[in-house]
Image (cartoon, rainbow, N blue to C red):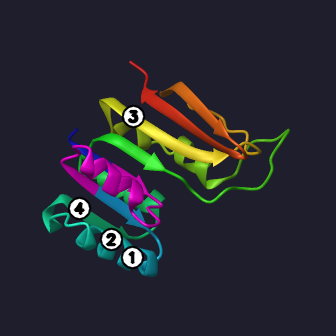
Amino acid sequence: MRGCWSCLAGTGALSLESLSRGAANAVCVELSSKHARHIRDNMETTGVEAGRFQIIVDDALKVLNQLAAQGQQFELIMADPPYGEKNVGRRSVSFAQKLLDHPNLPALLASSGLFVLGHTKRDTLGIPAALEEIKMLKHGDSIMRFFQRKS
């Protein structure tokens, strides 16, 4: 696997797992500088070489634009944003929906890549035409959805 991008990286656990399973590198985007310090500490504690990960402290939607402008692509993109409000009967305004709607998201995903998105089951998301859902896992109030770029 060439690399993974984890937005809303939290503790960096998903990126660490990806690196341990063969990802060449990981880019973690986290808005909180406190969480970013924890990610760096976790990477160092587990012995990940500094050149294999990058931590960006900024808004994920803004960074998405920057990475796309640089022509970067990832085999794996993971996002588990804070859960939005219940939106039954109307279009979601959650961060998960904003990620799905972002015009540069498909450009960041390698042709054989996978986008994994976590959200609450009470958040009814609209899927953009550029992505194809290939799997959905449900556990309690949480849903993990797996997408690929449409050919």
**Disc 1 designates what residue?**
38
Position of 125 relative to 46 (above/below): above
Instruction: Please provide the residue range marked out in magenta.
Output: 5-26
Tell which circle, 2 or 3, labels the residue nearer the N-terminal end: 2
Which one is nearer the viewer's eye here, 26 or 90? 26
For residue 90, side relative to residue 144 (left or right) = right
Residue labelled with disc 4: 53
Percent across and percent down for residue 32 are: 47, 76
Q: Nearer the viewer, mark 2 or mark 4?
A: 2
User: Does residue 90 appear anywhere in the picture?
Assistant: yes
State how far apart marks 3 and 4 are (Cα): 19 Å
Look at discs 4 and 1 and give the one toward the viewer: 1
Q: Residues within 10 Å of mark 2 (few under 14, many from 20)?
A: some
Type of residue at label 2? Asn
Q: Is residue 25 magenta?
A: yes
Residue placed under numbered mark 2 in the picture: 42
Tally of numbered discs: 4
The alpha-carbon separation of the residues under discs 2 and 1 comes to 6 Å
Helix, strand or loop at label 2? It is: helix
Q: Quadrant of the N terminus?
A: top left
Q: Nearer the viewer, mark 2 or mark 3?
A: 2
